[in-house]
Amino acid sequence: MTTEDFVTDYLDFLGVRATDGTTGPPSLAGLNRLFVAHLDRVPYETFDINARRVAPSLCGTAAVNRVLGLADPSARPLTHPLAHPCTSDPTHSHAPMLARGGYCFELVRAFAQLLRRLGYAVTLHRANCGPPTSVDWRAVTDPSNPAHVNHVVLVVALEGTRYVADVGLGDGPPKVFQLMEGGWEVHGRHFRLERLSPAVWRWTHTPSGSFPGFQMEDAPLADENDDSYSAAFGRKHEWYHSSLDSGFYMKGIVVYRQRAADGGVYKLRGRTLTLRVGGERVQPVEVATASSLREWCVLIEETFGMTIWATFTPSELALLWSRTAPSPKL
């Protein structure tokens, strides 16, 4: 696939067009359009980890192919018994959507590929999601240590100003934000950024967020090719997929999508889908709870645009469904 095909396909997938200003000269307005569309169209999800799959490649091409649903070797046929009626109907005009989301290392990698092709000046930065810590997390080498590098932050430079465009946070900020100390509010959600030292920033999530925030290195990766990216994040990526102590495995399946229209956050935790629209004092509303694997697959397809029945084997689907069962009360 040529560079032009890749960019066109990606923009089509996000539902943005050249007339939106996204393919013109890099601009803050264009960056925000792409960012908001990505949060809405490409979900944050941990299915692979919970299905005990081998860690997928972190190379740029693989990340883009994952988002666009290309070259999935495990794709199921249209006649799969869990197929949604609209996509299992042989007279329907489109094939099942094999597109996938992912978590930070995959989503940020793919988005960085797109932005660079569109002419944006992108840098990638090592980070650690979690509470503030006095530990020098940048020097931790053991991936099982919570202070180990566990996140990547995407920064874009525009006319001398740096902006964070992090599509890998799940329920993070619904718009890009300037890399500058201070607090701000979007859709009733409050965030804060402070500089802990010349080398490290601390971003604090909204009080209702799913995690406290992250520390980020000011200095970017010296080289951002596939080998350097894997060297920076590959060990943690492998550990997340192989260890039963991985937080993503221990906490079970979670999927996020942020609506472009109002920043509303869809969250699937286990079998229950909720929607939160508004500030941190607004409680999420339960949308639906699946009572069967088929209902669960349909709920995921209709809310997040992923046909997991087409991308996981029957045994993997059975495992995923079992991972959504409520824990017995003691």
Image: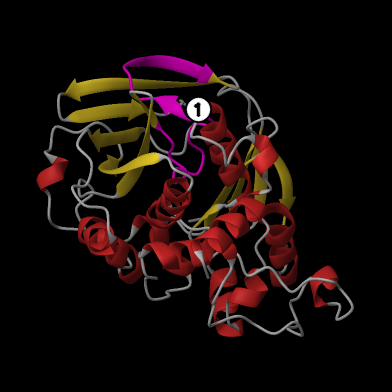
In which quadrant of the rendered view does residue 83 lie? bottom right
Horizontal and vertical percent position of residue 226: 29, 63
In which quadrant of the rendered view does residue 297 lie? bottom right
Relative placement, left or right, of 193 versus 228 is right
Vertical position of residue 59 compared to residue 23: above or below: below
**Of residues 326 and 174, which is closer to you in this image?**
174
Magenta stretch contains residue 79: no
Vertical position of residue 118 compared to residue 238: above or below: above
Please name the colour scheme applied to the rendered image. Answer: secondary structure
Magenta stretch contains residue 172: yes
Q: What residue lies at 44% left-to-right and 26% top-to-bottom? A: 177
Horizontal and vertical percent position of residue 100: 56, 63
Vertical position of residue 217 compared to residue 292: above or below: above
Q: Is residue 245 visible?
A: no
Q: Give the range drawn in magenta.
A: 164-185
Q: Is residue 27 visible?
A: yes
Q: What residue lies at 39% left-to-right and 71% top-to-bottom? A: 56
Relative placement, left or right, of 232 versus 135 is right
Residue at image mark 1: 28
Q: What element carries label 1?
A: helix
**Of residues 98 and 241, which is closer to you in this image?**
98
Horizontal and vertical percent position of residue 113: 43, 53
Horizontal and vertical percent position of residue 182: 36, 14
Q: What residue lies at 37% left-to-right and 70% top-to-bottom? A: 57
Question: What's the magenta bit mostly, secondary-structure-wise?
Answer: loop
How packed mark 1 is, by other alpha carbons closer than 10 Å (few <14, some 14-19, many 20 or more), is some
Vertical position of residue 14 compared to residue 72: above or below: above
Label 1 is placed on what type of residue?
Leu
In which quadrant of the rendered view does residue 220 lie? top left
Q: What residue lies at 54% left-to-right and 77% top-to-bottom? A: 71
**Of residues 82 and 40, which is closer to you in this image?**
40
